[in-house]
């Protein structure tokens, strides 16, 4: 797959709350690989939010297995995952597919059963596409972001404009 195709997600949603879990189930997907920062909660948060718990519990109640797949340091991500009672892959090295593949192995899932969900084209979407899983791009959870993410957003906006999403 070329890099341009790797930047285009399979699905685009406004918020993780808009994720149609029944649609995913109809595709044979029962595993969610979730980015945390600005997807499931605020950027660089150290605790899950009520929204985080609600999203995870909704998916769990529908029979989904889940794993956080984060480029963040292990202490912060692991702590959040433990509170959400889901496993975590830290230092995922997104956009490389390594972290996605480690999460699949950890959960004992095949790539056809999984969806990678995140708010960044250059990390979450590309990692998921190169790993061969279904990808869902969600608008960011909050406006506040780290400076190095802010620097990438204009390039991401250009990609989205060209690709039409």
Image: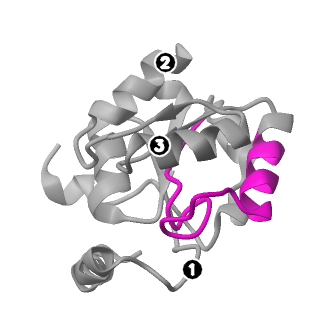
Out of 95 and 25, give the one closest to the viewer: 95
Q: Earlier in the sequence, mark 1 or mark 3?
A: 3
Q: Earlier in the sequence, mark 2 or mark 3?
A: 3
Q: Is residue 31 above or below residue 127?
A: above
Q: Residue at image x 46%, y 65%?
A: 119
**Which numbered tag is attached to residue 43?**
none
**How far apart, in angstroms, are the residues tagged by discs 1 and 3?**
22 Å
* Disc 3 secondary structure class: helix
Would you name the residue on which mark 3 appears? 75
Residue at the spot 25% in from the left edge and 49% down from the top edge: 95
User: Residue tagged by mark 1?
Assistant: 142
- In the rendered image, residue 22, in percent from the top left (x then y), is placed at 77, 44
Could you tell me which secondary element the residue under label 2 belongs to?
helix
Left or right: where 40 falls relative to 135: right
Residue 106 in sight in this render: yes
Residue that appears at 48% across and 26% down: 112
Magenta residues span 32-59
Q: Does residue 73 belong to the magenta stretch?
A: no
Left or right, 1 with respect to 125, comes to left
- Image depth: mark 1 or mark 3 in front: 3
- Residue at the right extreme? 61
| Foreground of the two, 14 or 48 | 48
Tell me the residue at 22%/41% (across/down).
Answer: 96
In the rendered image, the quadrant that contains the N terminus is top left
Element under disc 1:
loop
Could you give the CA–CA distance between mark 2 and mark 3, rounded to whole angstroms? 18 Å
Q: Which residue is mark 2?
A: 106
Report the residue that reaches farthest toward the top. 108
**Residues at badges 2 and 3 in contact (C-beta under 8 Å)?**
no
Q: Position of residue 109 (x, y in %)?
A: 52, 18
Specify the quadrant of the image occupied by residue 24. top right
Q: Nearer the viewer, residue 153 or 22?
A: 153
């Amino acid at each position: 797959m070329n890099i341009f195709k790797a930047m285009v997600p399979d699905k685009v949603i406004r918020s993780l709350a808009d994720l149609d879990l029944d649609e995913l189930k109809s595709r044979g997907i029962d595993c969610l690989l979730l980015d945390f920062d600005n997807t499931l909660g605020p950027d660089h948060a150290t605790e899950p939010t009520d929204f985080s718990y609600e999203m995870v519990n909704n998916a769990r109640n529908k029979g989904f297995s889940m794993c956080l797949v984060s480029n963040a340091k292990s202490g912060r991500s692991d702590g959040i995952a433990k509170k959400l009672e889901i496993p975590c892959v830290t230092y995922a090295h997104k956009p490389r597919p390594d972290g996605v593949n480690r999460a699949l192995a950890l959960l004992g899932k095949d790539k056809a059963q999984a969806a990678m969900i995140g708010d960044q084209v250059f990390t979450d979407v590309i990692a998921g596409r190169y790993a061969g899983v279904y990808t869902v791009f969600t608008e960011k959870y909050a406006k506040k972001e780290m400076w190095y993410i802010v620097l990438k957003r204009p390039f991401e906006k250009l990609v989205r404009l060209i690709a039409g999403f």
